[in-house]
Amino acid sequence: MSQINRKYNFQDETRAIANQLDEELDQLVESYNAQDLMVSNHISQIVDPSSNDATRDKHVSDLDIKSINDQIHNVSSGGLDLRYYTKPEIDEVTGQLNTLNTNDKSNLVNAINEVNSLNTAATYVLDLSKWVVKNDGTDAINTTKGINDAMAWAVQNGYTEIVLPKGTYLIDENSPIEPQSNLTLNLNGSTLKIRTNSNSDYSVIKFQRNQVYSRITNGKIIGDRNAHDYSSGTTHEGGYGIQIGSFTPTANGGSNAKYITLDNLEIYDFTGDSIALCSTFGQISPFPTALASSWEQGDIDPSNGNLIASTSKIRSTLNISMTQPLIVKYGYFGLYGNGFGSLGSDITCDYYNVIFYKVDHSFISSKTLVQFFDEIEVPLDASYAKVVLHQSTVPASANCLINVRVPTFPQHVQVKKCDLHHSRRLGISVNGAKNIYIESNAIHHIGGNGTVLGTDPQGGIDIEDGYDLNQFIHIHKNNFHDNEKYNIIVVNGKCIYITNNTLLKLNNQAYVSLAINGGVDRAIVTGNTIRHGKVVISGECQFNNNHVYGTQVNAASVYATKPINIADSTFYNCKFVLDTPFAFLISIDNCRFVNDADKLNSLSGSLNWSIEYKNQPQKFSNCIFEGKDVQYFSYIPNNTTKQHWMFENCLFKGIPIPMMGRLVNCVGDGALLGTNYSSSTGLTTDVLELYNCKFISSDSNNILLTINNLKSFRMEQCYIEKTSGWVLKIQNVGSDVVVKNNTIKVVNDTLPRSIVTLDSSFTGSQISLTNNFIYSTNNPQVGIDNQTTNRPQIVIADNIFKKTTLKINGSEVMKNNIIDGAIDPYYKVTTEPNALYYTKGQVLYNSNPTSGGYVGWICTTAGTANKTAWAPATSYPLNALVNANSKVYKCIVAGTSGAIAPSHTTGTALDGTVTWQYVDVLAVFKQFGAII
């Protein structure tokens, strides 16, 4: 025997034990090898029975030799692999072999038999007849009792494993299998099946006596879901396959089961859960109401236990006795929430200190920065303890719900390579546990509408009862599918790790595949594949490196102190909803949101847009958005979407850009029509800002950016290139518009269209277009078309226009604009103006000055220029402009004028058959600067 293979993988917490065993095993290997050599030497000394030696009859026969060889082979090549020996025992047998008379067959055989008979810490195969156990699926009471008795006997006699002969074992619903500490129950491919019953709760296997280092492996555990008698009317959700811990353990037991392993098991058809991890509440004194009224301002010095003044801490006046039975039994206690996990609304801290004292009130030691729901180890000589909270305010009694407790709960439990399915309630429930490892399992078909209906929550894994007692729960490499309502739901807990799992479609699509509820702290969700479901994240969560397909993801923080970070994930054909009342509590970084044809053709009914904004603004950074949707960005029109959403370093590929918030260093590649949403408060609240962005579009049919229903719009240092068609249309903006330092380029338009349009629907007060480069590379276009009618202040200054012109109404303030190489050409005229609006003092220069003429014209009365005087009995076409009585009018109904000129100053008036609309006061100009 050259080596011994260890049967267990030890946890870090037992590494010292593992090292000690390694040393012992090394000694055993040396002894085995020495023994093997010794036996081989003795065999070689036995005379060959085929020899002619005269003493052959004194030697062993051929059959004897074969028998000895078989036994020696059993020793030297594996027969001892399941047994463990102490070195003195091996040395003793080796010494006996050294003294053997090799010609004496009986001595050699006896020695080998003695080696085979060594029995310390061995595997025991259960003797059915000895323990009155049936493996034919009958006699539940005796079978259950016999298995329990056999396990107790095996441990007492040094066995570390008990193996069941193959078969089906009927288990008593009133008396579960109770595994022993330091023992493996190897089902050996057998089945444990609960006897059909009407109990509202039962367990096939139950850990309720603080067992440690126990393992269940290699078999089936079957419930009675379909045959169960549900006539009592309760939910019957307490029927479990394996229960680790108990809400109500036996009087001499407890739920502190530790280092439990469940592996290679198929567990199914239970009225409740396939596996349940349960805890006890462990209430001790002082009771919550007494503690709630005991707080006072002040601290306790953790170095000596003396009371000291403090404005940042509060202390309880009560002494917590360390001699209470549960503390004496388990050696710890702590401060926890009530039955619903709540500490009370006036408890605002996360930490507290504990100071221990002897019976004579002398100081022993302290523990600082202890968190609620953590256990505090009690010094052996402690008589009582005092506690200090790390907060400055004394809570109202009604708003302090802290409980002093000694809970018992499962710890260091592994569930590996199990197939959990078709139970009514859950695959695994975690109801108060720490350091739990759920790995490489299949969890499926839980709940449902089969022969017997499921009972809620009808999901794969539920981490709920026990609240923040649930800590360091690892859910890794599991496969969830065909569950009724949930795959994983985490209601409360700390440090929950959900990694590298596959979460597939639920049977009931109205429910949630993965839920991280608001009570959760520090959930890590990474490396998972999630398909065709819903994901709801409300608690503190890192959601990284996940691939999500055909799924609605809701990120909705419910507490200001619990951020959600979503990073490095792909959302394929998904709907992503952001909805939280706290600004910038959710960050989305380096994610990809992509759609293909399936989004429009197959998934648009339930996932009918890609990004949905609600409530307070959040931030996207370094993200890619691509692939068409019915509507890519959706702003909920219920006035709950607030301004200042941020997109930084994002790429929008072949989709409309988002039209609210702030975009910085973003790129629109193949950008499509962008139109912002309709909101009754948009004109007073909503803002769109574009900084240092680049938008490239080949869409020739639509306006690239339509700015409407916003309080303000700002675009600075952006580059926009469009093959043809309109680029920017400013519609109804309630306040101001700034377009500054941008390059706007139309590269291949064959039609004369406006690049920038200031629409007549504009109601704001100011538009500023400065330092822009606006040009066309093909046919000349209208660079800026001012169609506004409300006379806002419009500043057009320091711009460069190439192959583009201005279409203005005269209300603009324009300066230092270069149009095809000419500076401010619109201020150079040959005659007094006949159109457009002019302000008082505005100067127009004579573009053809001559001797005896004038330098130009100056406006002395602000208004609209017009040199066509109204005339009676004259036919006027539609849109004709005339002046009368120092006013300007526009024909809106063609006809023939009457005898009296119009003089109204608002609205319309009839003149003969012509209807005139008032336009403006008539501008008055005077020549200046006579040229001599």
Image (cartoon, helix red, strand yellow):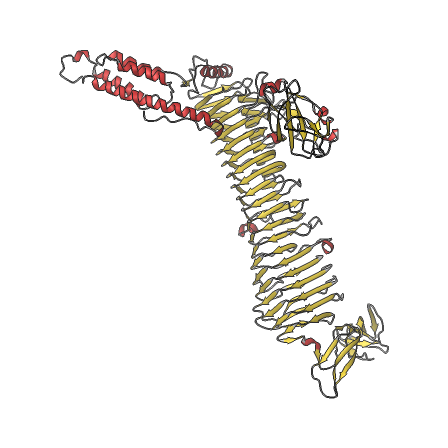
Query: Could you say where residue 861 lies in the image, as x and y percent from the top left?
Result: 81, 74
Q: Is residue 243 left or right of residue 828?
A: left
Residue positioned most to the right: 900
**Dividing the picture into quarters, in which one does residue 727 lie?**
bottom right
Q: Residue at x 83, y 72 (%)?
A: 910
**Dividing the picture into quarters, in which one does residue 35 lie?**
top left
Q: Is residue 676 visible?
A: yes
Query: Could you say where residue 433 lies in the image, as x and y percent from the top left?
Result: 57, 28
Q: Residue at x 59, y 28 (%)?
A: 432
**Up/down of 279 relative to 825, above or below:** above
Towards the viewer: 149 or 661? 661
Q: Is residue 242 left or right of residue 579?
A: left
Query: Could you say where residue 806 lies in the image, as x and y percent from the top left?
Result: 67, 72
Q: Is residue 211 left or right of residue 731?
A: left
Q: Which quadrant does the C terminus fall into? A: bottom right
Query: Could you say where residue 304 lies in the image, as x and y percent from the top left?
Result: 64, 26
**Up/down of 884 relative to 731, above or below:** below
**Up/down of 892 relative to 343, above or below:** below
Q: Which quadrant does the N terminus fall into? A: top left
Towards the viewer: 640 or 356? 356
Q: Is residue 233 visible?
A: no
Total marks in image: 0
**Up/down of 852 relative to 697, above or below:** below
